[in-house]
């Protein structure tokens, strides 16, 4: 998660950091877990989570009291046209590689030094691979180059 250098609007920075926290597939956290991970004042965090939930960016499961990404996050992701075009262009190649190699295949794009998987045969599409993760970026870097070229070709059409 990226906190800025302080030049932005603090509440907007915090809201975006919260959304980034939940951007891993299957991530479900309680209020206490979010508070511990981010270290925000509890009163501020309560207001931010309530606002994000009221606006549909987060969802609160009433039974487990855990927050997850809401429908608005999905809608925003689907609206990101370059990723949709990249997925459509790369999917046949990814499926063929997956079948041939009998392994998980990721196509990623570079975003501010992180590789973001946008096409994936595994179960974690949309994850960030960067310095703070345990996952090796060496294989992902090759796919990042492919994804960048494929994206340019798709936009050129």
Image (cartoon, rainbow, N blue to C red):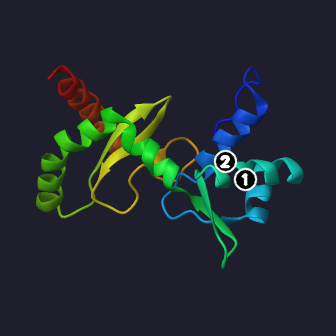
Name the image quarter holding the N terminus. Answer: top right
- Asked whether, in this view, residue 131 is left or right of residue 44, the answer is left
In the picture as drawn, the residue positioned furthest to the front comes out as 54
Secondary structure of residue under mark 1: helix
Q: Is residue 70 above or below residue 115?
A: below
Picture mark count: 2
For image coordinates 29% across by 29% down, the residue present is 148
Q: Does residue 138 appear anywhere in the picture?
A: no
For image coordinates 32% across by 34% down, the residue present is 81
Please state which of the two labelled residues, at mark 2 or mark 1, is closer to the viewer. 1
Task: Give x and y (percent) for residue 95.
Answer: 16, 55
Question: Which is more toward the observer, 33 or 58?
Answer: 58
Give the residue number, with chain letter if any, for mark 1. 49
> In the rendering, which numbered label is found on residue 18?
2
- Cα distance between the residues tagged 2 and 1: 8 Å
For image coordinates 24% across by 34% down, the residue present is 146
- Asked whether, in this view, residue 83 is left or right of residue 95, the answer is right
Task: Give x and y (percent) for residue 145.
Answer: 29, 31
Quadrant of the image occupied by residue 88: top left
> In the rendering, which numbered label is found on residue 57?
none
Name the image quarter holding the C terminus. Answer: top left
Task: Give x and y (percent) for residue 37.
Answer: 74, 55
For image coordinates 66% across by 65% down, the residue present is 29
Mark 2 touching mark 1, by CB under 8 A?
yes
Classify mark 1: residues with Cα within 10 Å, few (<14), some (14-19) or many (20+). Answer: many
Secondary structure of residue under mark 2: helix
Classify mark 2: residues with Cα within 10 Å, few (<14), some (14-19) or many (20+). Answer: many
Task: Give x and y (percent) for residue 25.
Answer: 48, 59
Q: Does residue 88 appear anywhere in the picture?
A: yes
Q: Is residue 153 above or below residue 11?
A: above
Q: Earlier in the sequence, mark 2 or mark 1?
A: 2
């Amino acid at each position: 998660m990226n906190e800025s250098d302080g030049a932005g609007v603090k509440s907007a920075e915090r809201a975006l950091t919260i959304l980034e926290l939940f951007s891993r597939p299957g991530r479900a956290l309680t209020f206490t877990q979010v508070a511990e991970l981010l270290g925000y004042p509890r009163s501020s965090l309560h207001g931010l989570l309530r606002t994000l939930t009221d606006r549909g960016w987060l969802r609160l499961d009433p039974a487990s009291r855990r927050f997850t990404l809401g429908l608005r996050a999905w809608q925003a992701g689907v609206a990101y046209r370059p990723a949709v075009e990249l997925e459509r262009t790369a999917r046949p190649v990814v499926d063929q590689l997956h079948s041939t190699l009998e392994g998980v295949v990721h196509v990623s794009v570079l975003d501010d030094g992180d590789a973001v998987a946008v096409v994936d045969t595994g179960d974690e599409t949309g994850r960030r691979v960067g310095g703070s993760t345990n996952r090796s970026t060496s294989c992902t870097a090759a796919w990042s180059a492919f994804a960048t070229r494929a994206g340019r070709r798709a936009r050129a059409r």
